């Protein structure tokens, strides 16, 4: 039986950040990854906050070499309305840029650099059983030859993402409070991309905020284009090899024919019902990180930032515990991670009920408010000096109400849902 210090489940951003940090502290770390890299994944538009996590884990320089598309902000659009945020103009003193990445290349680079740091990284290995206690953790996994292998570790970090290994094995999953939604997406050739469209993510709201479209340009001349909405609508778009998706992309008014005559890199893919939570994030001998904890919605591109932040925090607390400290995982991990999740939850709610759009598409937006919102969009959701973080659960609704009264706008929460959808 192999004995190690820390087992990490999953080689995505949360797992590689955690493993790299711990390897730098001298621990024997093994990552078990179910798939083979490179592999396709969404979550392609990063937030500046995650650059700090990559840097502290010693992974940033490896990513810089790949020459990904630099991202300096985000643009939100609804018909003729447009609002752009630039990270150089944010409230929090943090990173002013990040990248837009093809996750197959990004995740592979993180994995290879983590392996170079001395982490044992095993692909095509599926975790079958995990037994946890205060001192020793026993794991059984199947290797690529379908052999059942026994492993013992002092601690387990579950960064398995959508695989949700420990939530499944330990019955920790709980339903999301959000309406079940889905996404359909592809990568498209983008020869008609304008200079204004060549750098940052564009988010287009439609169907009275029930649906939205993303366009994420990459440095190789292709663009990720996806549609998010309630599951029934996404199913209709994905029928017949995605003909409904393709029809919207070709004819979407705000895109002005940008993708009317281009080729897809791959057939559209759909993901349904991705929002999910957990009853707890830690237990004796284990902690959950990344999407194994909770995934809300892709609207503000928060997935990778939560992965890297939770992976790094999990690794730091694991180091302290293995050094003999008495770690308060509830206070120092779960409550901290949950605070960040709750901030983004308020903004996701504000997006779909229209409060966020009322603010950013107002005839006049206070520049101080805009800078504070920009810091949230940059991922700095733990900065309690920012009123749009500290008062996240009330500030959007309050400000939106003031703007509606000032501009004599109807409250969308009192309006019926539209019966007609864009086709």
Image (cartoon, rainbow, N blue to C red):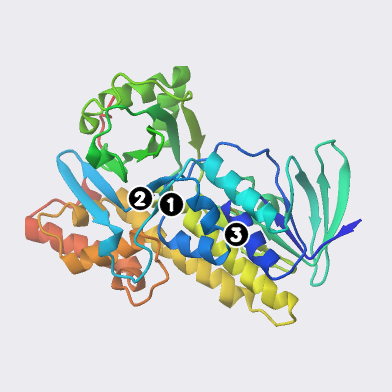
Q: Is residue 205 above or below residue 140?
A: above
Query: What residue is shown with label 2?
Result: 71
User: Farthest residue toward the right?
Assistant: 1
Q: Is residue 144 above or below residue 176?
A: above
* Mark 2 / mark 1, whichever is N-terminal: 1
Cβ atoms at labels 1 and 3 below 8 Å apart = no
* Mark 1 / mark 3, whichever is N-terminal: 3
Give the Cα separation between the discs numbered 2 and 1. Answer: 8 Å
Mark 2 is surrounded, within 10 Å at the Cα level, by few (under 14), some (14 to 19) or many (20 or more) other residues, namely many
From the viewer's side, name the closer residue of 419 and 129. Answer: 129
In the picture, residue 239 is in which quadrant?
Answer: top left
Q: Is residue 221 above or below residue 153?
A: above
Query: What residue is shown with label 3?
Result: 17
- Residue at disc 2, secondary structure: strand
* Mark 2 / mark 3, whichever is N-terminal: 3
- Residue at disc 3, secondary structure: helix
Camera-nearest label, 2 or 1: 2
Residue drawn at x 18%, y 38% is 79
Cβ atoms at labels 2 and 1 below 8 Å apart = yes
User: Farthest residue toward the front?
Assistant: 65
Query: What residue is shown with label 1?
Result: 46
Q: Is residue 39 above or below residue 11?
A: above
Q: Quadrant of the C terminus?
A: top left
Count all numbered tags in the image, as a single digit: 3
Residue drawn at x 72%, y 57% is 119
The answer, for residue 66, to whether it is visible in the render is yes
Give the Cα separation between the discs numbered 2 and 3. Answer: 21 Å
Give the Cα separation between the discs numbered 1 and 3. Answer: 15 Å
Residue drawn at x 37%, y 49% is 70
Cβ atoms at labels 2 and 3 below 8 Å apart = no
């Amino acid at each position: 039986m192999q004995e190690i210090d820390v087992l990490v489940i999953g080689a995505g951003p949360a797992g590689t950040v955690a493993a790299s940090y711990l390897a730098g502290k001298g621990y024997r770390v093994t990552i078990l990854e179910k798939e083979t890299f490179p592999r396709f994944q969404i979550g392609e538009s990063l937030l500046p906050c995650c650059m700090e996590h990559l840097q502290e884990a010693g992974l940033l320089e490896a990513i810089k070499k790949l020459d990904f598309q630099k991202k300096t902000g985000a643009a939100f659009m609804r018909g003729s309305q447009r609002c752009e945020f630039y990270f150089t103009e944010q409230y929090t003193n943090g990173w002013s840029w990040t990248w837009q990445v093809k996750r197959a290349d990004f995740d592979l680079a993180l994995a290879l650099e983590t392996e170079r740091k001395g982490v044992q990284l095993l692909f095509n290995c599926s975790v079958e059983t995990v037994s946890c206690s205060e001192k020793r953790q026993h794991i059984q996994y199947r290797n690529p030859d379908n052999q059942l292998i026994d492993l013992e570790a002092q601690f387990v970090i579950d960064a398995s993402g959508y695989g949700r290994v420990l939530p499944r094995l330990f019955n920790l999953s709980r339903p999301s409070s959000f309406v079940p939604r889905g996404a359909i997406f592809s990568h498209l050739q983008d020869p008609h991309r304008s200079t204004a469209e060549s750098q940052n993510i564009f988010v287009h709201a439609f169907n009275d905020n029930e649906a939205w479209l993303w366009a994420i340009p990459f440095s190789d001349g292709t663009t990720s284009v996806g549609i998010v909405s309630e599951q029934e609508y996404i199913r209709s778009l994905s029928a017949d090899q995605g003909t409904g998706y393709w029809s919207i992309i070709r004819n979407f008014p705000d895109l002005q024919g940008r993708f009317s005559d281009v080729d897809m890199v791959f057939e559209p893919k759909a993901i349904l019902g991705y929002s999910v939570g957990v009853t707890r994030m830690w237990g004796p001998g284990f902690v959950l990180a990344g999407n194994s904890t909770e995934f809300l919605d892709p609207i503000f591109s928060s997935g990778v930032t939560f992965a890297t932040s939770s992976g790094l925090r999990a690794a730091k607390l694991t180091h302290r515990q293995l050094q003999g400290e008495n770690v308060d995982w509830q206070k120092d991990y779960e409550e901290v991670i949950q605070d960040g999740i709750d901030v983004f939850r308020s903004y996701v709610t504000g997006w779909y009920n229209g409060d966020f759009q009322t603010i950013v598409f107002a005839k006049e937006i206070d520049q101080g408010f805009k800078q504070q919102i920009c810091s949230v969009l940059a991922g700095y959701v733990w900065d309690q000096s920012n009123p749009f973080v500290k008062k996240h659960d009330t500030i959007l609704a309050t400000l939106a109400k003031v703007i509606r009264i000032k501009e004599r706008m109807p409250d969308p929460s009192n309006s019926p849902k539209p019966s007609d959808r864009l086709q």
